[in-house]
Amino acid sequence: MIKKIIQKYIRIVQKIFITIALFILYIAGFGITLILVVIFNRGLLGIEKKGKNTFWKDAEGYEADLNECMKEV
């Protein structure tokens, strides 16, 4: 009787503890990863500056040609 009550109590405490621990691990893991990526390799985040005043990257493969434009009409 007491053993069953203790087992239910332990299961509830375990579920709560695991949920809280996984949330903290998730936040800490992504936080640490973000900090390391910003410090060591900003290019992975796509925030690498291409010019003095912009973060925009030049488009590749979009050279406008008059003949190509005529084909699309």
Image (spheres, rainbow, N blue to C red):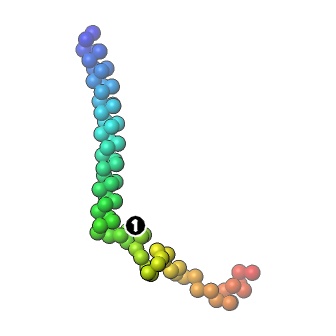
Q: Where in the figure is residue 36, as x and y percent of width and height?
A: 29, 62
The residue drawn where x is 46% and y is 74% is 55
CA neighbours of label 1 inside 10 A, class few (<14), some (14 to 19), many (20+) = few
Query: In the rendered image of this protein, does residue 45 appear above or below residue 28?
Result: below
Q: State the residue in front, 72 or 55.
A: 55
> Label 1 amino acid?
Leu
Note whether 73 is above or below 15 in the view shown.
below
For the point 31% across and 43% down, the residue is 24
> In which image quadrant can residue 38 be found?
bottom left
Q: Quadrant of residue 21?
A: top left
Q: Residue at x 27, y 24 (%)?
A: 10
| Placement of 58 over or under 21, stated as above or below | below
Number of dots carrying numbers: 1
Residue 68 location (% of width, % of height): 66, 86
For image coordinates 33% across by 25% down, the residue present is 12
Name the residue furthest right: 73
In the picture as drawn, the residue positioned furthest to the bottom comes out as 66
Q: In the image as oriented, which residue stretches furthest toward the front?
A: 53
- Left/right of residue 4 with respect to residue 48 in the rendered view: left
Q: Position of residue 27 (x, y in %)?
A: 34, 48
Name the quadrant of the N terminus. top left
Q: Residue lying furthest left in this view? A: 3
Looking at the picture, tell me which residue is in the foreground, 59 or 56. Answer: 56
Q: Which of the image's four quarters has the C terminus? A: bottom right
Q: Position of residue 32 (x, y in %)?
A: 29, 56
Residue matched to label 1:
45
60 left or right of 13 in image: right
- Check disc 1 and report its element: helix, strand or loop: helix
